[in-house]
Amino acid sequence: MPMMTAAQYEESLRDLNLVVYMFGKQLDNVVDDPIIRPSMQAVAKTYELAHRPEHDDIMTATSHITGKKINRFTHIHQNIDDLVKKSKMGRLLGRETGCCFQRCVGMDALNALSIVTYNMDHQLGTQYNSRFLKYLEYVQENDLTCDGAMTDPKGDRSLPPHKQPDPDLYLHVVEEKANGIIVRGAKAHQTGAVNSHEIIVMPTIAMRKEDQDYAVSFALPADAEGITYIMGRQSCDTRKLEEGLLDRGNILFGGHEALVVLDDVFVPWERVFMYKEYEFAGQLVEKFAAYHRQSYACKVGVGDVLIGASQTAAEYNNVAGASHIKDKLIEMNHLNETLYCGCIACASEGSKEPSGTYSVNTLLANIHKQNVTRFPYEISRIAQDIAGGLMVTMPSEMDLTAPATGKWLEKYFTANCDVPALNRMRILRLIENLTLGTAAVGYLTESMHGAGSPQAQRIMISRLANMKEKQRAAKKLCGIETDDRKQTTADR
Ligand code: SF4
Ligand code: FE
């Protein structure tokens, strides 16, 4: 089954036996849980669009291992065109779901591992790449969603993994067996974890020899024995438990994050892709981070939704013709398309790794993500400006449908006589959802901290910007010799 339909994806999740806790209780039925289901529907969109002829070029690819048509989320980028299409796919899905659709982390983990397992084998004589390619074929053949699990809880930030008072604050190997390893630890903020078939674990930082037990990468079925998922809350999440849909804002989709605890979990050797090769932990982190920073093309698509909602709110308020409103919408588009430039640029400037995988331009991917930590906040500020205060003072849908109060809401919330108050309330709730509610986790906080917090990108920018070349260009133009020897009057 190289490409599942959305319905098949949903059914495949029902076969999993995940241990998931939320609000202090274990869930019997994850797929139909009203708080989690919208996030499952967002991932399902990645399956649905792959079967639509109009999106075929963006959403599907040809496997470099089997030659079969596969979902692009399981593909290893074979050229620049693949990288550019990945960025376009992110924008498309962000626009179609208005939230985090979660499947990128697994795609980015697969691509990073395709590069680093090859490099390890080449330099150390290990056998990881063939093992990885076998696993990749399994993922592609079954069209699986993978949780790319990188972020450890990290405990005391001033201490390396081996010096933490609690050794489990970074995930590590606790025992080596003839047929595999036992691991213990946790991965935090795991996007889409309970909608995934597989979990791909990677180290979270570069490591030294003393941390070698923490330099481990592997894949497990999401329901492997010893894995527990604890769902994270989102602002306004319990609105999904209320009667009616309007107050959710986005009535179809959402995202989720979870804390994933691995309590002495067994990993067979055939699923281990790094085992104590601490010198390569940093490379794996960097490759994954660069790909995932590119993946923040998703926010451009969510930005499209917010801009569309703002234009609609302006029309419903009958102010769309005002010059300052037009200018605000221009500013929103300017910021959003600037983000698009970044994710297309880092893809277009990508290059071939020794493994054959194409990787993005790391400097430009970091610049793009740094912009993502800022622009969605400004776009949201303008959206809230256009929406007006009613967005947060509006009564509930239940008041709209109650006979005693509904007539007053209909009467006093009508701004444009051609537009029912109901529609005005709907669009304002969508803006609220994107900038303050459940989707604000995806559009704002994830923009800030996902794929690394702003400082992580600034460190990479300082490492990768070619300052010597910039200085050379400047000095040459004003007559300073490049060797910088002390010039005397006689030199002039
Ligand atoms: Fe993908 Fe964006 Fe969600 Fe990250 S935040 S998983 S890049 S949709
Ligand atoms: Fe993310």
Image (spheres, grey):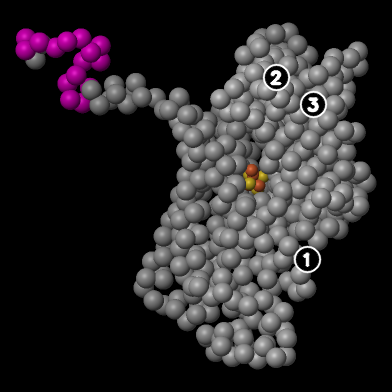
Which quadrant does the N terminus fall into? top right
Residue reaching furthest to the left: 489
**Which residue corresponds to mark 1?**
241
Q: Is residue 319 left or right of residue 107?
A: left
Which quadrant does the C terminus fall into? top left
For badge 3, the amino acid type reads: Arg
- Give neighbour class at mark 3: few <14, some 14-19, many 20+ (Cα, 10 Å): many
- Residue 184 is labelled as 3
Secondary element at image label 2: loop
Can residue 62 be seen by looking at this rendering? no
Q: Who is closer to the viewer here, 191 or 484?
A: 191
Secondary element at image label 3: strand
- Give neighbour class at mark 2: few <14, some 14-19, many 20+ (Cα, 10 Å): many
- Give neighbour class at mark 1: few <14, some 14-19, many 20+ (Cα, 10 Å): few
For the point 50% across and 45% down, which residue is it?
373
Q: Which residues are magenta?
A: 476-490
**Which residue corresponds to mark 2?**
215
Please identify, in this view, whether the residue under mark 1 or under mark 2 is nearer the observer.
1
For badge 2, the amino acid type reads: Ala
- Residue 179: x, y in percent? 91, 17
- Residue 383: x, y in percent? 49, 65
